[in-house]
Image (cartoon, rainbow, N blue to C red):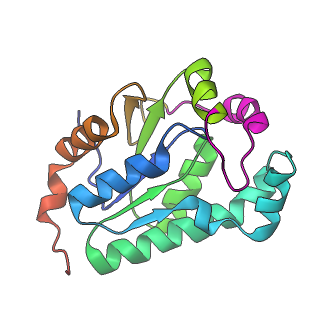
Amino acid sequence: MSFVPSRIIVVMGVSSSGKSVTGQAIARRLHAPFLDGDAFHPPANKDKMRAGIPLTDDDRWPWLTALATGLAAAAESKGVAVGACSALKRAYRDRMVLEAREPILFVFLDGTAELIGSRIAGRQHEYMPASLLASQFATLERPAADENVLTVPVTLSVEAIAERVVKAVPHLKSFKRKQ
């Protein structure tokens, strides 16, 4: 595996794939700040999702920009930053890279609709109902070979995924981190 050296790592995938918990585990291992994409959604986006209405691209652009600039600022301050964001389409991932003004390594949590459907059925989320999972899979554009991505199966434990990611980014040890 070789990647474009990146100070920003974004754990991506559909709802209930484990983005937040996995991102937090990676951030702990790297002593990095963690930014959850959910915290960057404006209230109108949350209201739409709460009502079971899928977001449009126009809903997502400001959210993606806010998250990407937040991750870039965190990486500038600490030398590395980890985020969680669905980043379902290539255009969304490209937009995040553009807005961050630096490479991003995307960690794609790959799982079947059946497995992730069983996960979402067993959880309560502030505004993401299980009814929107099908729209997430319909929107998902699996990362292509030419993208800066590490694909990992969601069937691995969170700690195994975090370990795999940290081993894949040894260059992060060379960034000076302000503690």
Say left or right for 136 vs 109: right
Q: Quadrant of residue 38?
A: bottom right
Of 179 and 147, the residue lying toward us: 179
Q: Residue placed at 19% from the left, 80% from the top? A: 179
Relative to residue 83, is residue 74 depicted above or below? below
Q: Residue placed at 87% from the left, 51% from the top? A: 51
Relative to residue 130, is residue 35 depicted above or below? below
Relative to residue 67, is residue 134 depicted above or below? above
Of 49 and 174, the residue lying toward us: 49
Q: Is residue 104 visible?
A: no
Residue 37: image location, x then y, percent: 56, 60
- Residue at the extreme left: 174
Residue 148: image location, x then y, percent: 39, 43
Say left or right for 24 vs 48: left
Of 165 and 119, the residue lying toward us: 119
Residue 75: image location, x then y, percent: 34, 71
Q: Residue placed at 34% from the left, 39% from the top? A: 158
Q: Residue placed at 54% from the left, 58% from the top? A: 96
Q: Quadrant of residue 172?
A: bottom left
Labels in figure, total: 0
Relative to residue 40, is residue 152 depicted above or below? above
Residue 127 magenta-highlighted: yes
- Quarter of the image that includes the N terminus: top left
Q: What stretch is highlighted in magenta?
A: 122-143
Say left or right for 69 vs 66: left
Q: Can residue 102 be seen in this view?
A: yes
Residue 49 magenta-highlighted: no
